[in-house]
Amino acid sequence: MTTFVDRVQLYAQAGDGGIGCASILREKFKPLGGPDGG
């Protein structure tokens, strides 16, 4: 019986992150709500 040897080279690269995003909490009586965690 012949033995097979599998060989794989895998190269992966994710995105560079971009410039990001700022998101502010908005509520009726809070004009400066701060970051909303999103």
Image (cartoon, rainbow, N blue to C red):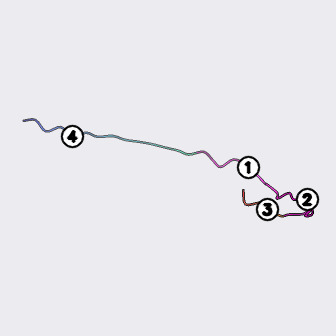
Kindly report which numbered mark, 3 or 4, lies closer to the viewer in this rendering: 3
* 10 Å crowding of disc 2: few (<14), some (14-19), many (20+): few
Residue 15 percent location from the top left of the image: 60, 45
At 87% across and 59% down in the image, what residue appears?
Answer: 27
Q: Which residue is under mark 2?
A: 28
Residue 14 percent location from the top left of the image: 56, 45
Q: Amino acid at mark 1?
A: Ile
Mark nearer the N terminus (1 vs 4)? 4
Q: Amino acid at mark 4?
A: Val
In the displayed structure, does residue 10 sit left or right of residue 30? left
Mark 3 to mark 4 CA distance (whole Å): 53 Å
Which image quarter holds the C terminus?
Answer: bottom right
Tags 1 and 4 touching, CB below 8 Å: no
Tags 3 and 4 touching, CB below 8 Å: no
Mark 2 to mark 3 CA distance (whole Å): 15 Å
Q: Which dot marks residue 19?
A: 1
Tags 4 and 2 touching, CB below 8 Å: no
In the displayed structure, does residue 24 sit left or right of residue 13? right
Mark nearer the N terminus (3 vs 1)? 1
At 63% across and 47% down in the image, what residue appears?
Answer: 16
Q: Which residue is under mark 4?
A: 5
Q: Which residues are magenta?
A: 15-33
